[in-house]
Image (cartoon, rainbow, N blue to C red):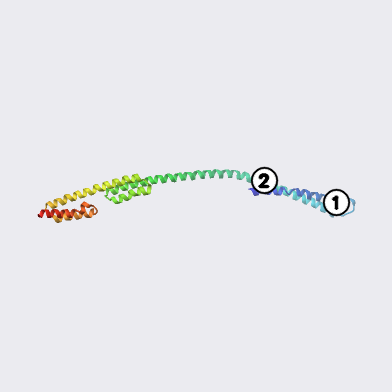
Amino acid sequence: MEETEQIPRKSGSFLWLYGVVLVLALVVLGLGVYQVASGRGNYTMLAAGMVSVIAVLLMWSFNINVKAAREEEVRKWDETLGPVNERLQYITVLLNQVSEQLLISERAKGIAFRESERDALRRAIREEMHRRDYDAALMLANEIEGGFGYKQEADRFREEIYNSRDAEVRKIVNEAMGNIDRYCQAEQWTNALREAERVMGMLPNDAQVRNLPNEIEARRQAYKK
């Protein structure tokens, strides 16, 4: 745009040269007329002057028309680009607004996704506890703390899991102790040991369960005496 506006200014700055050349051509024409009128010359100077004047006028007129045409072109170009620039600015503003809305939407979706994922973890913990898979439930509780940063909620879940597992262990041990007691009273020592081994396979780390074979043997020896 700036280059187009500079063209007519540059061409207009040289139009004064045509005036100088026209004056020179008129001088030549005048000398030719004077020589022909005085009878001291031929028509060469007159023809040269006339051709020079006509040529300068034609070139001058041509350049004036070119300058006007270029100025008109620049004016039309400005008129054409003005609304286009305004529309481009309007589109830029709209794109910025759309970009901001998309960014807000992505953040909102991220927040909603995190909440839904955390709800899914909660349900999964309950399901694992219902299946008595307490190790898997503990891993999911740790994921709530490590993946989402909810330490207090993870601590509550872990405490609930530990309590539920302890209650389940005590229930298994009490049932096993009842069975072992019945076997011992019936002098079915082999069945009592099998029951102890079964419970030891389920709870290998429980101290009371590990001591069951010794208790059965002690009761057997006491019965013999």
Label 2 SS: helix
Q: Residues within 10 Å of mark 2 (few under 14, many from 20)?
A: few
- Amino acid at circle 2: Glu
- Distance, label 2 to label 1, CA atoms, is 41 Å
Residue at horizontal 12%, vertical 55%? Answer: 221
Residue type pointed to by label 1? Leu
User: In this orientation, which residue lies closer to the viewer: 223 or 72?
Assistant: 223
Q: Note whether residue 74 is visible.
A: yes
Left or right: residue 179 versus residue 34 is left
Q: Nearer the viewer, residue 95 or 70?
A: 95
* Horizontal and vertical percent position of residue 9: 69, 47
- What residue sits right under mark 1 in the picture? 31
Vertical comparison of 163 with 198: above or below: above
In the image as oriented, which residue stretches furthest toward the left?
225
According to the picture, the residue beneath numbered tag 2 turns out to be 72
Q: Residue at x 29, y 46 (%)?
A: 159
Instruction: Locate residue 43, reporting x and y percent.
Output: 85, 54
